[in-house]
Image: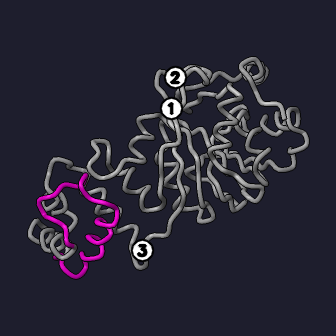
Amino acid sequence: MTLLGPAEIRDLAASLGVRPTKQLGQNFVHDPNTVRRIVRAAELTGDDVALEVGPGLGSLTLGLLEAAQAVCAVEIDPVLAKALPDTVARYAPEHAGRLHVVEGDALRVEVEQAPTALVANLPYNVAVPVVLHLLATVPSLRKGLVMVQKEVADRLVAGPGSRVYGVPSVKLAWYATSKLAGKVPPSVFWPVPNVDSGLVAFTRREPPAGADRRETFAVVDAAFAQRRKTLRAALAGWAGGPDAAERVLRAAGVDPGARGEQLTVEDFIRIASQRQAHASPR
């Protein structure tokens, strides 16, 4: 297996007339050791179907093809999507049959291959929406390893009480347990970003029986929309008034004077489950 280094990445880009764009968040990995590290951290088995979003020039794709049963690569750039099979045929012909390319936006396309693992170098500007959308719409996903901006990685895995704990933290916790799996320096990318990247590993978990995701997420959004307000005030619009919010919170065993950043996802689930019984009509 030949992985792509700096020279191969630049040659491929030049041959395709590709110039990385900020609009698409394109920063291509050109360090084989980083690719090996990501694939190793993803803990793929020969039974896994890997879902890669934004494969770009194919550096990570080649590593995934060696470790997984198959790779479904979703690429929004039509030039890159068309070129990826040729790159795989050139550098890993023995694995070319394992690749399936889907051209389109990962927030809109339908994935038919029932992938089991999301492994991707995600564009910084859409990382959180992509992870949450795929966990919501691709039930076959059981685990993942994503590379995102370090600041985003910290927010995704943050726990209650952390200053960066917020909506992404709680919503990811609904779907999965997560942890930081390392830091990645800017030097392994072309072009070189001005921030560090972080690896986030997650394992899907089932939410409590009877929990309503839409209602729970509505509570989460309301609680963090006005972070400095107490939950009694922040949830007033959602519950039908401050008094109604207080009744719901007390019924859920949550202090009305607390703030959203103090609550676990289980707390938010309990609040959501109490609304129908205790809140006034909106």
Mark pair 3, 2: CA separation: 40 Å
Residue that badge 3 annotates: 208
| Residues drawn in magenta | 253-280
Q: Give the left or right position of residue 160, taking residue 66 as reference.
A: left
Relative to 20, residue 260 above or below:
below
- Say which residue appears at 68% left-offset and 38% top-offset: 55
Relative to 90, residue 201 above or below:
below
Mark pair 3, 1: CA separation: 32 Å
Dot 2 amino acid type: Pro
- Say which residue appears at 54% left-offset and 23% top-offset: 186
Q: What element carries label 2?
A: loop
Identify the mark at residue 197; answer none if there is no mark.
1
Q: What element carries label 3?
A: loop
Instruction: Please check the rendered image and state whether residue 259 is part of the magenta-colored stretch, yes or no.
Output: yes
* Circles 3 and 1 in contact, beta carbons < 8 Å: no
Which residue is nearer to you in this view: 146 or 34?
34
| Residue lying furthest right | 94
Residue that badge 2 annotates: 193
Dot 1 amino acid type: Ser
The image quadrant where one finds the N terminus is top right
Relative to 130, residue 257 above or below:
below
Give the class, few, some or many, for how many residues have Cα within 10 Å of label 2's Cα (few <14, many ≥20).
some
Instruction: Please check the rendered image and state whether residue 89 is part of the magenta-colored stretch, yes or no.
Output: no
| Residue lying furthest bottom | 277
| Residue 14 in sight from this viewpoint | yes
The image quadrant where one finds the C terminus is bottom left
Mark pair 2, 1: CA separation: 9 Å
